[in-house]
Image (spheres, helix red, strand yellow):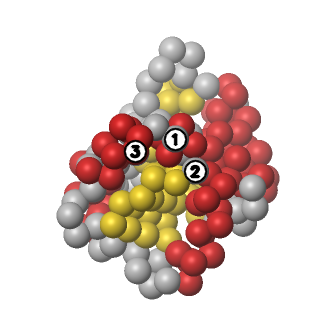
Amino acid sequence: MLTIRIDDRLIHGQVVIGWGSHLGLKRLVVANDEIADNEWENELMRMAAPPDVEAQVLTLADTVRQLAVWQENPEPTMVLLNSFEDLLRLARLGLSPLDVNVGGVHFQEGREEILSYLYINPEERKQVMELAEMGFKLTCQDVPGSPCHSLRKILEKSS
């Protein structure tokens, strides 16, 4: 089972405890070129995972190469991205459209509040719509048990 989540905090309590226990995660993958190339940040991310969960930090290209393996493997895996831009880059590298959990894109200057845990700027809005046009289904849900919202529908209502 494979889950892809956009969360700008990457590995943190909500992911490890909330989603980890809910999904029975056995593998957490941070897909991020900068962190993969930074030894210190790479190690920090891997240390944030519980001892019974395999943690990996991969470049986006390496992530695309591994996705087919993870999709065929029954071992629950979550791939964490920190931006819509990285999801778009994965799509351009060959990721087929699938469901994506949007769990936390937090306040920054220039971003508009969409939900309490989701803020986006005009460029991210364009990226979301492009991803939706490609066939990606982006569903907002910060923690298991909270309401799910279609990001595309929210953005269409607010434009």
Q: Earlier in the sequence, mark 3 or mark 2?
A: 3
Instruction: Identify the residue under disc 2.
Output: 59
Q: Residues within 10 Å of mark 2 (few under 14, many from 20)?
A: some
Q: Which residue does the image show at 44% across and 44% down from the upper left?
A: 7
* Residue 114 on image: x %, y %: 51, 33
Say left or right for 140 vs 90.
Answer: left
Q: How many numbered badges does the structure rendering display?
A: 3
Q: CA distance from mark 3 to mark 2?
A: 11 Å
SS class of the residue under badge 3? helix
- Residue 42's tag is 3
Mark 2 belongs to which amino acid?
Thr
Secondary structure beneath dot 2 equals loop
Crowd around label 3: few <14 · some 14–19 · many ≥20 (10 Å): some
> Where, quadrant-wise, is the C terminus in this rendering?
top right
- Image point 39% across, 34% down: which residue? 116
Query: How would you rate the neighbour count of disc 1 (Cα within 10 Å): few for under 14, some for 14-19, many for 20 or more?
Result: few
| Whether residue 93 can be seen here | yes
The residue most toward the front is 39
- Answer yes or no: do the residues labelled 3 and 1 have beta carbons within 8 Å? yes
Mark number for residue 37? 1
Mark nearer the viewer, 2 or 1: 1
Residue 107 is left or right of residue 33, and the answer is left
As measured in the structure, the alpha-carbon distance from the residue carrying label 2 to the one carrying label 1 is 8 Å
Q: Which residue shows up at 50% across the image and 45% down it?
A: 36
Name the residue at 70% across, 47% down: 89
Of helix, strand and loop, which one carries label 1?
Answer: loop
Q: In the rendered image of this protein, does residue 106 appear above or below residue 148? A: above
In the picture, measured across the screen, residue 61 lies left or right of residue 139, that is right
Instruction: Kindly identify the amino acid type of the residue bearing the numbered disc 1.
Output: Asp
